[in-house]
Image (cartoon, rainbow, N blue to C red):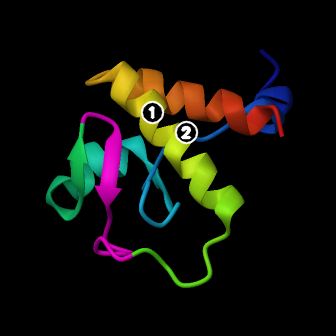
Amino acid sequence: MCPALFEKTKRLMDLVCICCGEPWGVDYVLHDEPNGFDRSGGLIRSCPCCHGKEPDGMTEERRSRLSAVAAVAELLGDDVDGLAATLDDFEALK
């Protein structure tokens, strides 16, 4: 693939905290700061940003999206890369 085209289409593989919605790189979660997250597989229940406290003013739409992320994460279990790829695909559909 042409390097310039690759840079335009390259997307980051992120996992999302279902408490606050903060995206986190898979490598960071798994290797750089693995003890900083309350997680099971790719399901992040709390992160260093929220420490398990939902942010004020979260919309119902955002809460619904995070519930959908949680459901997909539960289905995929320990398949962290699969969850990150699925979330990446969902972002591409926006």
- Magenta segment: does it hold 45? yes
- The residue shown at (39%, 42%) is 26
Give the total of numbered labels: 2
- Image location (x, y in percent) of residue 60: 66, 63
Which residue is tagged 2? 68
Q: Tell me: residue 71, above or below residue 77.
A: below
Residue at image position (77%, 15%) is 1
Which residue: 55% across, 39% down? 68
Q: Which of the numbered marks, if any, corresponds to residue 25? A: none
Label 2 near label 1: C-beta < 8 Å? yes
* Residue at the outermost left position: 35
Quick one: 66 or 4, which is closer to the camera? 66
Position of the C terminus, as image quadrant, is: top right
Amino acid type, callout 1:
Ala
Taking the spot 25% from the left edge, 43% from the top edge, the residue there is: 30
Up/down of 1 relative to 59, above or below:
above
Residue on which the image places disc 1: 71
Secondary structure type for disc 2: helix
Taking 15 as reference, is 88 above or below it?
above
Specify few, some or many for label 1: CA neighbours under 10 Å numbering under 14, 14-19, or 20 or more. Answer: few
Q: Nearer the viewer, residue 88 or 53?
A: 53
Quarter-wise, where is residue 35 in the image?
Answer: bottom left
In the image, farthest residue toward the bottom: 56
Q: Amino acid at mark 2?
A: Ala
The secondary structure that dominates the magenta segment is: loop
The magenta segment:
41-53
